[in-house]
């Protein structure tokens, strides 16, 4: 079971399961790896994503069926969910729901968020979690269907997508508390900067020229901002990681979902503190492969190479960039890949 609070008619899950409910979760992803789903295996399930794990919901995946509260996903700590063509939300009430806690992250690359049931296809973000919308359709036929709610100090970014639906109050982005959202929309007719309106619609195109529309409602304490990031204005961001090239130490970042060490896919999530890149614009794959190249270039033999790699991995652990459980796996993959290709 889950506790809930009601704000303006939108049901927000408190996203902290009772202890007994956690132990009874039907599907748990907690090994720190990336798991891809492209079928209906999570249609009715209660799902836990923990310990830095990543769940990718690809085309063909459906979460939320005809029964009330079917298909519910709880995302914790620095774990991530990526919606890449899936459908969240069904005919039952409160189906296809995602609750984000801690520093977790949801990225919507495409698909449908919303269904025919009331309150289906909802996202509730709490704590310091983040929601990034790159594309997709948010909204459905049910009332309060296709709703994304930001609470506490959570953040949202809208780079693309289309909000709206035939149901009452469907296809909406809500802002509560100290939440913040940025809209990267061009040709909207609205000047860049903080948005004064507490409700409204922004429509325009993405930086790539694709139509974008978002409907929003916010409390006065929530800050929504329109960012002018269009061709001919704003900063160039070659790799699309959100860090402009003039500030990006890795302007051609490896943004694959898992870290590849030369020719080996480690299946370790390519995330730093739950994000695709750090403040300098570098992904975990960038950092690891830079470490390996530098160690290789400065080493005269295999022993020196091994010692340099081990020192570098220890420093990454010390700086909090590399979880302890991945240390040995990276070392083994790195050495095998490098010396087999010599």
Image (cartoon, rainbow, N blue to C red):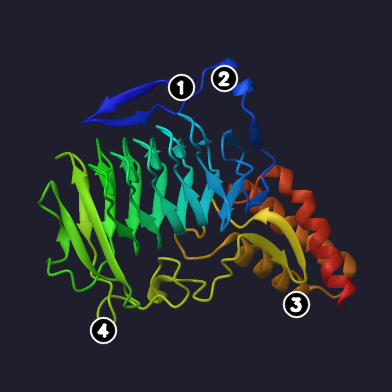
Res 333 visible: yes
In primary-sequence order, the first of circles 3 and 1 is 1
Q: Which of marks 4 and 1 is in front?
A: 1
The x and y percentages for residue 207 are: 32, 75
The x and y percentages for residue 233 are: 25, 79
Q: Is residue 86 left or right of residue 300?
A: left
Quickly name the residue at label 2.
Answer: 21
Front-most of residues 164 and 201: 164
* Image quadrant assignment for residue 221: top left
**Mark 2, secondary structure of its residue:** helix
- Residue sitting at the far top: 20
- Residue sitting at the far left: 196
Q: In this view, does 331 lie to the left or right of 71?
A: right
**Mark 1, secondary structure of its residue:** loop
Front-most of residues 94 and 30: 94
Residue drawn at the location 67% of the way across and 61% of the way down: 259
Characterize the local packing of mark 4: few (<14), some (14-19) or many (20 or more) Cα atoms within 10 angstroms: few
Residue drawn at the location 12% of the way across and 70% of the way down: 189
Front-most of residues 336 and 138: 138
* Image quadrant assignment for residue 186: bottom left
The Cα atoms of the two marked residues, 2 and 1, are separated by 8 Å
Characterize the local packing of mark 1: few (<14), some (14-19) or many (20 or more) Cα atoms within 10 angstroms: few
Quickly name the residue at label 4.
Answer: 232
Q: Nearer the viewer, mark 2 or mark 3?
A: 2
Quickly name the residue at label 1.
Answer: 2
The disc label shown at residue 297, or none: 3
Q: Is residue 313 left or right of residue 132?
A: right
The Cα atoms of the two marked residues, 2 and 4, are separated by 52 Å
In primary-sequence order, the first of circles 4 and 1 is 1
Residue drawn at the location 28% of the way across and 51% of the way down: 165
């Amino acid at each position: 079971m889950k506790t809930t609070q009601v704000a303006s008619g939108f049901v927000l899950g408190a996203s902290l399961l009772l202890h007994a409910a956690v132990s009874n979760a039907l599907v748990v992803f907690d090994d720190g790896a990336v798991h891809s789903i492209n079928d209906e295996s999570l249609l009715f399930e209660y799902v836990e994503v923990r310990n830095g794990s990543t769940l990718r919901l690809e085309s063909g995946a459906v979460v939320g069926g005809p029964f009330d509260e079917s298909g519910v996903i709880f995302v914790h700590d620095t774990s991530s969910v990526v919606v890449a063509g899936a459908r969240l939300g069904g005919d039952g009430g409160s189906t296809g729901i995602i609750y984000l806690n801690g520093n977790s992250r949801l990225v919507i690359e495409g698909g449908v968020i919303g269904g025919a049931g009331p309150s289906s296809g909802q996202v509730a973000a709490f704590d310091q979690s983040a929601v990034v919308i790159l594309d997709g359709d948010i909204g459905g036929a049910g009332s309060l269907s296709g709703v994304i709610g930001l609470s506490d100090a959570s953040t949202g970014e809208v780079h693309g997508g289309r909000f709206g639906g035939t149901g009452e109050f469907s296809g909406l982005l809500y802002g509560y508390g100290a939440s913040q959202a940025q809209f990267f929309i061009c040709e909207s007719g609205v000047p860049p900067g903080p948005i004064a309106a507490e409700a409204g619609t922004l429509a325009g195109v993405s930086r790539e020229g694709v139509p974008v529309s978002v409907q929003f409602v916010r409390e006065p304490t929530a800050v929504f901002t329109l960012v002018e990031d269009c061709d001919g204005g704003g900063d160039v961001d070659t790799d699309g990681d959100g860090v402009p090239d003039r500030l990006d130490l890795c302007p051609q970042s490896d943004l694959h979902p898992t870290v590849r060490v030369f020719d080996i896919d480690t299946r370790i999530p390519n995330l730093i503190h739950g994000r695709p890149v750090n403040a300098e614009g570098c992904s975990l794959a960038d950092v690891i492969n830079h470490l390996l190249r530098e160690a290789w270039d400065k080493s005269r033999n295999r022993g020196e190479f091994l010692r340099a790699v081990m020192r570098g991995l220890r420093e990454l652990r010390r700086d909090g960039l590399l979880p302890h459980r991945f240390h040995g796996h990276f070392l083994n993959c790195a050495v095998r890949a490098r010396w087999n290709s010599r």
